[in-house]
Image (tube, grey):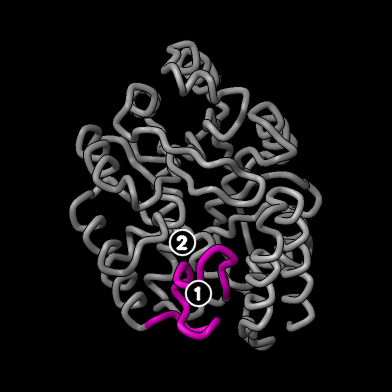
């Protein structure tokens, strides 16, 4: 596994150098630290646990299909990546009926939509309404309304209770679909206000906002329409910040996090945050999901791995 981690570190460092040249030296230092992280060590005798992947940026269809087959992902929520768009997602879904759960996005990190967010242009919402009316898409997302800068992604910081976000949630209510949002903890108060304003809209919080434990507990207790998504939280080491993972040693989940998940088994879903930059990096992401699921009780595991996401995208009418 050390070789896999070295490959992941090299890939991430090279990408950072292209996107943020002035920070290349610091990026290399971060990746060297990441390469020293302990790796997940799966037990070959342990059966693979089937799960639905709740967070995939589709960039390489063949790689995604291979990884799903190898690591037990029976279905996957897919949305755009650097090499795909909403139309691509629809086409892939048609080619593989029942395998993918397509979400539609109008997120502001895309230059195509950035000016509409800047001006709260209602035409953006009209286009989203058309996509949802097609019946193809089972949710909205990922919507990166508030996203810290990272290699290859410009910072976004749009008001979660602004006109565009409220319009998106109104459409989610109209079409009865969930919304997957990326909103950092710097805007958590506004996120709470949005959740309170739309109590009938189910919201999936990407990476759970990378919150510490006490904030995760607080948000889940206050907002019954919030689901905490664990993609990237299960990685042995996160390249942006060491405290983003919920693992205490690269493998074992902190007991306090396990306690919270077991106490609220209907409020968590798993995901890989796959983006297909390299086979090595994606293997680590998929193995990390299996590693988490093995540490849950059987009843909680079934909810987190499968049922919770199905309840969100196929609600009982």
Q: Nearer the viewer, residue 263 or 198?
A: 198
Q: Please tell me whether mark 2 sits on a helix, a strand or a loop.
A: loop
Q: Where is residue 183 drawn, in percent x and y?
A: 40, 45
Q: Residue furthest front?
A: 22
Q: Is residue 243 magenta?
A: yes
For the point 76% across and 76% down, which residue is it?
6
Dot label at residue 197? none
Task: Identify the residue at image location x=71%, y=48%.
Answer: 19
Q: Secondary structure at mark 1?
A: helix
- Residue placed under numbered mark 1 in the picture: 292
Q: Would you say 227 lies left or right of 26 here?
A: left
Figure check: 104 above or below 253? above
Q: Residue at horizontal 55%, vertical 63%?
A: 240
Indicate which label's residue lies in the foreground, 2 or 1: 2
Residue bounds of the magenta highlight: 237-254
Q: Which residue is mark 2?
A: 230
């Amino acid at each position: 596994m050390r070789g896999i981690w070295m490959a992941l570190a090299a890939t991430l460092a090279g990408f950072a150098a292209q996107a943020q040249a002035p920070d290349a030296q610091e990026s290399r230092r971060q990746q060297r630290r990441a390469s020293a992280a302990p790796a997940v060590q799966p037990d070959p005798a342990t059966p693979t646990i089937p799960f639905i992947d709740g967070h995939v940026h589709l960039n390489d269809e063949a790689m995604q299909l291979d990884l799903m087959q190898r690591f037990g992902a029976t279905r996957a929520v897919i949305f755009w990546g650097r090499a795909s768009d909403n139309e691509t997602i629809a086409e892939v879904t048609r080619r593989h009926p029942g395998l993918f759960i397509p979400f539609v996005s109008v997120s502001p990190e895309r230059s195509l939509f950035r000016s509409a967010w800047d001006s709260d242009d209602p035409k953006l919402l009209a286009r989203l309404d058309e996509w949802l009316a097609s019946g193809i898409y089972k949710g909205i997302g990922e919507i990166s309304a508030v996203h810290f800068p990272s290699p290859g992604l410009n910072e976004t910081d749009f008001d979660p209770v602004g006109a565009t976000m409220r319009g998106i949630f109104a459409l989610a209510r109209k079409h009865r679909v969930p919304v997957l949002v990326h909103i950092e903890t710097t805007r958590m108060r506004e996120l709470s206000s949005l959740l309170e304003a739309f109590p009938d809209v189910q919201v999936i919080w990407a990476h759970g906002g990378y919150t510490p434990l006490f904030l995760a507990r607080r948000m889940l207790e206050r907002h019954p329409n919030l689901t905490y998504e664990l993609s990237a939280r299960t990685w042995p080491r996160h390249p942006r910040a060491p405290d983003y993972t919920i693992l205490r040693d690269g493998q074992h989940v902190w007991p306090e996090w396990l306690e919270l998940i077991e106490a609220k088994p209907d409020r968590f879903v798993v995901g890989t945050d796959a983006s297909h930059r390299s086979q090595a990096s994606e293997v680590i992401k998929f193995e990390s999901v299996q590693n988490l699921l093995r540490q849950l009780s059987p009843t909680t595991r079934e909810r987190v791995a499968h049922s919770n996401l199905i309840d969100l995208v196929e609600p009982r009418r």
